[in-house]
Amino acid sequence: MDGKKVRAVAEWTAPSKVADLRSFLGLANYYRRFIKGYSKIVNPLTDLLKKDQKWEWTVKCQSAFDLLKQAVSSEPVLKLPEFDKPFEVQTDASDRAIGGVLVQDKHPIAFESRKLKDAEMRYSTHEKEMTGVIHCLDAWKHYLLGTKFTVVTDNVANTYFKTQKKLTPKQARWQEFLGEYDFDWVHRPGKHNDVADALSRKAVEEYVAALTLIESDFLERIRESSQNDAVYMKLVEQVGAGHIRKYWLNDGLLYAKGGRAYVPSGPLRRQLLRETHDPQWVGHPGIDRMLALLSRRYYWPKMEYDVEAYVRTCLQTGGKSPAAYRFARAKQELLDEAKDSLSKAQRRMKKYADLGRRDVEFSVGENVLLKLTPQIWKKISSKTVHHGLIPKYDGPFEILKKVGNVAYRLRLPDRLKIHPTIHVSFLKKYHEDALKETRKQAARAPPVIRQEFDKDV
């Protein structure tokens, strides 16, 4: 049997509390009719579910647990697929994990389970359920592509996903992926979807166990601090009695939704606020980022108000994080480098352009032509003429004096109502025609042509 098919069951760790055991037995009970001597095997485990029974995980309990895992993940419970019969994909999702089972004739073919990524944990319930479906179909595509099958989910919104009109980019990718498969949706409430539900919650319990192992020192401090918090102790009592389902107990400590440790009031909360905000490597986060960092692993009522108060009263921050300063400095360095490169390029281009450039110089008494621009034309003529019809030059005019290095004073007629000092860029050397007297001049057309037509009506 392929190990990947049964890994989700084979790697199931031993339960550490009643809730864990009930989750596992929910899966085992579903296949009890295929397990020989099921009642006898499960007896040590069901004894732990009795009222007022002290939790004690014995060798018999471990043996029964291992036997059931072996039975569920082997024949006759687990069977090989028959491709002439329809498949059924059962999926479910919890706050931190997704799970599924591939079924045929009520026998499991393969199991699948994994924890959600950090980004996926922020999905809505509907999107978490869809993530489970997408993951399972992709894992079992070698069974499902080209066949007609059924997808069972406990989220009724999923059954309308194929006809959903407004889609986010992520949902559009999902819909494109699902278009490769031929299947029907079936809604089945969670209480009737035991196997997938148990697989999805298995990873949550493993997450709490891993969290407890990693942060055992801090959790021990929570245990000590909780003795001085009357509200915390009251919650422990009510949760233990089953009056409150918002929290759950694990090794005497309170946990909130998502496997987050409940932190009692007092110095521990202030320590977490300080350690989340003040270290240099964190970068003095703002309210939203600090709340996101804290709420991944810890919880206490009105945490957001405490975070906001701490950030607003912190005098060390200047309104911008070190990352913002680094970004601004890097951007300024790039701008300075670009300016230097442009200046170097301009100087280099000017150097080669000046090699062929000669300053235009005229002598006093020399005749030149004056360039007529639309602005100059307006001063010398009252006629409105299209700029394309304005003569380019007028003249010739005699140079009277050189003014500075780049201007000349001209002898201008009274009709030109402009200042006589003209920049050299508006002047052009006049070349007199030596054959002017003998050359035949072309007759000019009259300035205005009028033509009348007689028409009889």
Image (cartoon, rainbow, N blue to C red):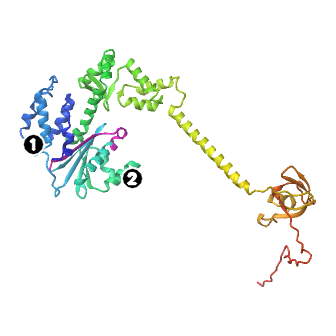
370 above or below 248? Answer: below
| Amino acid at pointer 2 | Lys
Q: From the image, tell me which residue sits under label 1.
A: 33
83 above or below 120? Answer: below
**Magenta run includes residue 116:** yes
Which secondary structure, mark 2?
loop
- Point out the tag, 2 or 1, that comes first from the N-terminus: 1
Quarter of the figure that contains the C terminus: bottom right
The residue closer to the viewer here, 215 or 356, is: 356
In the rendered view, does 71 fall on the left or right side of 389?
left
Span highlighted in magenta in the image: 105-127
Residue 338's quadrant in the figure? top right
Taking the spot 19% from the left edge, 39% from the top edge, the residue there is: 9
* Marks 2/1: CA–CA distance: 43 Å
Residue at the farthest bottom position? 456
Tell me if residue 45 can be seen: no
Q: From the image, tell me which residue sits under label 2.
A: 165
Residue 262 at x, y = what percent? 33, 25
Residue 175 at x, y = what percent? 34, 52
